[in-house]
Image: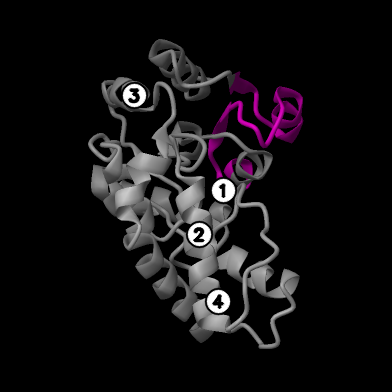
């Protein structure tokens, strides 16, 4: 059972945007004027697009990326006290995680565009890490798209759970069209949750057969997970 974090379980966008700007200027020497959509993207992918959109006069490489991710973790950590003040857990997130955790033979983790350190900080701040096995999660600390992270998680989870998890048993809950597409490419059934980034029609056109209005009804989330894994 895979969960997207940002705008699915919680929203700390204000803190994240300021941390992006600070880290980008520290590494490149240029201000981050033009942002890019974070939907379905990892921090590694976003950095290279930041460079292109902001006309940075350098050739981004793996070393520069590593510097940016380290600076981003530092910038984010320095604002840890702002997460609760400027962010929020989305309605039903905690209850839905608890409900799915009660389902038999279920291993829950995350597929996040954030680095492992930042993703963990977000979840811990709102007490959402309790029902998640973050040791097998997929994070933007590595320069791979989310579809590849999903494939990698399934391999790691098989060792953690003592058996192989098939594509039919793997579910990814997220709220954007790129995340739905990543699920299908990575070998997971998408369960979409409506968000400001995508309409229900767009999510269904992308391949989501199950679309929830939000996470406020944990029983509906459990039903969706059951439907997604018993087709």
Q: Secondary structure at mark 4?
A: helix
| Residue 40 on image: x %, y % | 60, 48
The residue positioned 34% from the left and 54% from the top of the image is: 156
Q: In the rendered view, does 183 fall on the left or right side of 112? A: right
Q: Earlier in the sequence, mark 4 or mark 1?
A: 4
Camera-nearest label, 1 or 3: 3
Residue 71 in magenta stretch: no
**175 relative position to 97: left or right:** right
Q: Residues within 10 Å of mark 2 (few under 14, many from 20)?
A: some
Q: Which residue is mark 4?
A: 25
Question: If you read the primary sequence from the N terminus, does the residue marked by circle 2 or circle 3 appear first?
Answer: 2
Q: Would you place residue 111 above or below residue 46 in this image?
A: above
Q: Which residue is mark 1?
A: 186
Which badge, 1 or 3, is on the more N-terminal residue?
Answer: 3
Mark 4 or 1, which is nearer the eye? 4
Disc 2/disc 3 C-alpha distance (Å) = 33 Å
Q: Residue at x 35, y 57 (%)?
A: 79
**Mark 3 lies on residue:** 100
Q: Which residue is mark 2?
A: 18
- Foreground mark, 3 or 4? 4
């Amino acid at each position: 059972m895979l969960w997207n974090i940002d705008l699915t379980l919680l929203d700390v966008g204000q803190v994240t945007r300021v941390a992006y700007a600070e880290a980008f200027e520290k590494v490149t020497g240029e201000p981050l004027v033009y942002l890019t959509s974070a939907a379905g993207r990892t921090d590694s992918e976003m950095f290279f697009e930041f460079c292109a959109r902001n006309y940075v006069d350098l050739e981004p490489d793996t070393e520069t990326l590593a510097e940016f991710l380290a600076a981003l973790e530092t910038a984010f950590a320095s604002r840890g006290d702002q997460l609760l003040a400027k962010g929020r857990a989305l309605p039903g997130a905690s209850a839905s995680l608890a409900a799915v955790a009660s389902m038999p033979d279920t291993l829950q983790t995350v597929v996040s565009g954030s680095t492992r350190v930042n993703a963990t900080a977000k979840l811990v701040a709102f007490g959402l890490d309790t029902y998640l096995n973050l040791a097998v999660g997929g994070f933007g600390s590595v320069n791979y798209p989310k579809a590849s992270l999903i494939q990698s998680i399934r391999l790691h989870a098989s060792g953690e759970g003592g058996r192989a998890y098939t594509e039919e048993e793997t579910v990814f809950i997220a709220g954007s069209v790129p995340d739905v597409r990543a699920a299908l490419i990575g070998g997971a059934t998408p369960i979409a949750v409506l968000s400001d980034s995508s309409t229900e029609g767009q999510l269904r056109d992308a391949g989501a057969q199950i679309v929830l209005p939000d996470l406020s009804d944990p029983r509906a989330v459990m039903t969706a997970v059951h439907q997604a894994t018993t087709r």
